[in-house]
Image: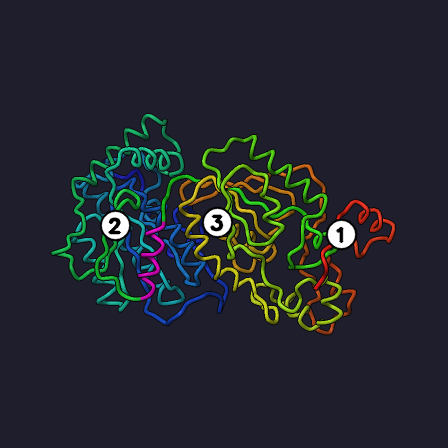
Amino acid sequence: MAPTSLVTERARKDSESSEDEVFYKEPKNVGFKTNVFKGLVVCLVGLPARGKTVLAHKLAKHLHWIGYKSKVFSVSYYRRKHIELYDSHEIFRIDNTEALEIRQLSAHEAQEDATEWLQAEGDVAILDGTHATPTIRKEVYDHFVKQMGFKVLFVECICDDEKILDKNVKEILQFSKDYKHMSAEKALDDFHHKIEHYMEQYETICPKEEAAYSYIKIFNEGDNMSVHRLNGFLQNQILSYVSNFRPAPRTYYFSRHGESEFNVLGRVGGDADLSCRGRKYAASLARYFNDAGISGLHIWTSEKKRTKQTAQNIKAPKEHLAALNELDAGICEGLSYEEMQDKFPQEFAWRDQDKLRYRYPWGESYMDIMSRLGPVLLELEQEDNILVISHQAILRCILGYFLNKKFEELPYINVPLHTIIKLTTFGYKCKMEVIKLDVECVDTYRHQPKNCSVERSPEDALLTVPAHFDALSLAALTNWVKAQPPLIEQH
């Protein structure tokens, strides 16, 4: 059956967004790249429903995090620009000459756009498609390596586990644009026929005939792997990621510690105990998770007292990780914003100008904690039903990673106290739920001031500082202190 409608001219600069094309563009001069290298093309290989698309997009997210501009070029995205409405698996038949030409054109267009993007600004182009035959793979290799001087890494996804295949097929039928207009029964039948058509032509990468290629073979979503001729630092970084990648749906829970004594007084950092309301939140959090009966629940906290105290009554195994410690404020540890402005007005202004990159003297920046969170994020890719109890800056970065936020957005993600954030992954996307427990607390969120000049007045500098007890009436502070144990000594 021929395609119902063909687009005769391609709009190469089409601005239409698509679920098949995701572009992670890092801010200029941001990232952790350790070397200058030629552009890299990661070419996915394998039958449909083997997890290629999920891997492509999640790999792009990971590469973005470690500082490489990456973009997914999906062959199906280009095919949909030529075929107005997908109506049958017949377009994947090898003897359907007209449809075969369209699919070949779509693959070439993806390659052309990947080439232009790598030449203009990109670091890693990810080709998401079946690339099912040695002839097709040779065309990819010859174009990018021999003609353009880039590197190519083939990543082949192989799967014969029926449970994994059933899971993948259900996800595809639920989210793919091809099947939105079909009934569930028709879509399932059509997709299985599509797989059969590709099986008639598919040949796995041959170690003998394709020995010149760099490739990684992934069997049953990571049960086993085969690696051949990896070339360079970045390809080994990709190997590290795919070795840890497990695409099953997962559930994560995140919470800041309960309100601390320093939160009440508007002070940053330190190792303060929980306030009275913070202890109430810890009790409420324990009731929530103990009553929920979540199978296999386990907990990660930082090494700080306030996170350990928040987790102590939850009936689940606990680990305390230095990587989850709050951003180190250096010489400003334990100070209030008012004291920072008074003692270090220039530093305070510089941080407001570029909160992402600013590093406290003898302390850290957001970029620093993003770097030390790398191993934690790789571990989280394999975890399920985990509760992470940490700090505002740390959770901003973790949530930013899973939600694909731009780097500049990270320091201003609102992560309130006494709130559970639940993330559920499906495919390469996440669903976020916010569960607010009914325990009062201070608001520690600070908007970026409009005036970030080093010449600004103290009033302008402190305009967006959240309210805390140092700034309230003496009577209110006295009444609060009566309900508290003695405050820890300030250093």
- Of mark 1 and mark 2, the one earlier in the sequence is 2
**Which residue type does callout 2 highlight?**
Met
Q: Main secondary structure of the magenta part?
A: helix
- Of mark 2 and mark 3, the one earlier in the sequence is 2
Is the residue 193 above or below the residue 35 in the image?
above
Number of disc labels: 3
- Label 3 neighbourhood size at 10 Å, few (<14), some (14-19), many (20+)? many
Report the span colored magenta: 233-244
Q: Locate residue 419, reporting x and y percent.
A: 62, 42
The numbered mark at residue 486 is 1
- Of mark 3 and mark 1, the one earlier in the sequence is 3
The numbered mark at residue 402 is 3
**Which residue type does callout 1 highlight?**
Pro
Q: CA distance from mark 1 to mark 2?
A: 57 Å
Q: Residue at x 77, y 67 (%)?
A: 458
Q: Residue at label 2?
A: 225
Pick the residue in front: 394 or 302.
302
Q: Residue at x 39, y 56 (%)?
A: 71
Pick the residue in front: 3 or 50.
50
Specify whether residue 344 is painted magenta: no
- Label 2 neighbourhood size at 10 Å, few (<14), some (14-19), many (20+)? some
